[in-house]
Amino acid sequence: MTNDLFDIKIGYASPKNPIALASMAGITDNKFASGFTNAGLIILGGYNLDRETNDAARKEIERGRKEFVSGDPMGFLKAELEAASKPGATIAVNVRAASLKPFLEAADIAKKFGAILEINAHCRQPEMLVLGAGEALLKDLERLCGYIREIKKTGVVLSIKIRANVVNDVELAKAIEKAGADIIHIDAMHPQGVDFGVIKRVRNSTGLFIIGNNSVVDFESAKEMFSRGADMVSLARAVLHDHRIIKYLVDEISSFQAMTGWYNAPKHICAGGDLRALAFCCLPVKPCALHSALKQAGLSAEEFMKIKLKFAKGTPIEYGEGTCFGSMTWCCKITKPCYLRDGALESSGLSDVEYMRIKKRLSEYIRKHMKM
Ligand SMILES: Cc1cc2nc3c(=O)[nH]c(=O)nc-3n(C[C@H](O)[C@H](O)[C@H](O)COP(=O)(O)O)c2cc1C
Ligand code: SF4
Ligand code: SF4
């Protein structure tokens, strides 16, 4: 598959597809990762960047956990990146540290290799928490945002790995975005199972690149994340059960993208979709979920109509004789079967992929006009 099929760009990083291998301390080193060359993103680590976090990791090993430890953390990081860097592969390094300086050093190293740096604000091992590392950063937003601002000055592409439902996720994501991070990697963990809603809440409130994580085990669970607004999904435990899952998902999502043109298209608003789905909404003429979505977007029904009509003018979706509202501007997503829309597509010579690409641009256009 070529990079063009998905056209994913995050600063200098261009993952070839939206399926990632997530980091597992003591497991996902360059050797383990070499079995996953199909993945769009390989997240190595978590590596411990200073004496304090390496000592903490040694204590964890004593009680049976797996960890990567080194007496020369930066040398180790460099060696791992050297071994993992291959043409066409996008690599990230998930890292922990007890202070800013080691993150800055690691950012310079990662950038030299064209890799993404991922701050681990996710680990909840007590030995890390007492150092103020891992999840402790979520509860010290000022320090986390200060780190992000300083690390971004190195020019590295920066991801923040978080665990959902620890603090207010929307406030957290907005602060992370404002501080300048590029990616939010969300472990959508919830005491009652996976919280797909957190992906939607973050999608609706930020423009961050979102990696959705937790319990992705098949194409259905991957699609749940994508249709809530994830730009990429990552897997950890599932690859331990079956190494072939990454290749399987890459193949599935690639076929889906080739067929539909918008691999992470949202569900319709009335089916629980995020605000990108306003691109698929009808003329606002009936009482339905559209009106509360518009309220959230800060738009009146009239403004919404004008925005959609202005975008559609001169594009092939302006037309749509025989469809519910006389224009495909108001038509549903391509995966919803409809012979009326399909007839209009055929008359205008528009393919399914072209139709969905226009709808994607329409969703971006609507987003620009939202007043949130
Ligand atoms: C053995 C193991 C080690 C992990 N180590 C890390 C780590 O070092 N850094 C990190 O951000 N997440 C770590 N995680 C969390 C995973 O990356 C992932 O967020 C979590 O397992 C949920 O995703 P899954 O359902 O695909 O496994 C670890 C998970 C496991 C099972
Ligand atoms: S406008 Fe149509 S697609 Fe949108 S929420 Fe209402 S019924 Fe659903
Ligand atoms: S014509 Fe079909 S696709 Fe268009 S709005 Fe009506 S039901 Fe939806």
Image (cartoon, rainbow, N blue to C red):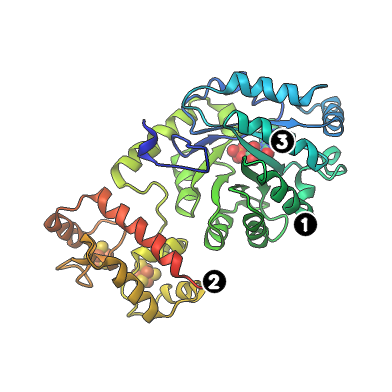
Task: Say whether marks 1 and 2 touch (CB < 8 Å).
Answer: no
- First in sequence: mark 1 vs mark 3: 3
The residue under the point 68% across, 55% down is 165
The dot on residue 142 is 1
Report x, y in % for residue 206.
Answer: 56, 59
Report x, y in % for residue 329.
Answer: 27, 66
Whole-Å distance between the Cαs marked 3 and 2? 33 Å
Q: Secondary structure at mark 2?
A: loop
Per the image, the residue denoted by label 2 is: 372
Whole-Å distance between the Cαs marked 1 and 3? 19 Å
Per the image, the residue denoted by label 3 is: 95
Task: Say whether marks 1 and 3 touch (CB < 8 Å).
Answer: no
With 305 as the anchor, is 67 left or right in this view? right
Crowding near the residue tagged with mark 2, few <14, some 14–19, many ≥20 C-alpha atoms within 10 Å: few
Q: Is 305 situated above or below 115? A: below
Q: Secondary structure at mark 3?
A: strand
With 131 as the anchor, is 243 left or right in this view? left
Write down the quadrant of residue 279 in the picture: bottom left
The residue under the point 59% across, 32% down is 115
The dot on residue 181 is none
Quarter of the render that holds ligand 1: top right
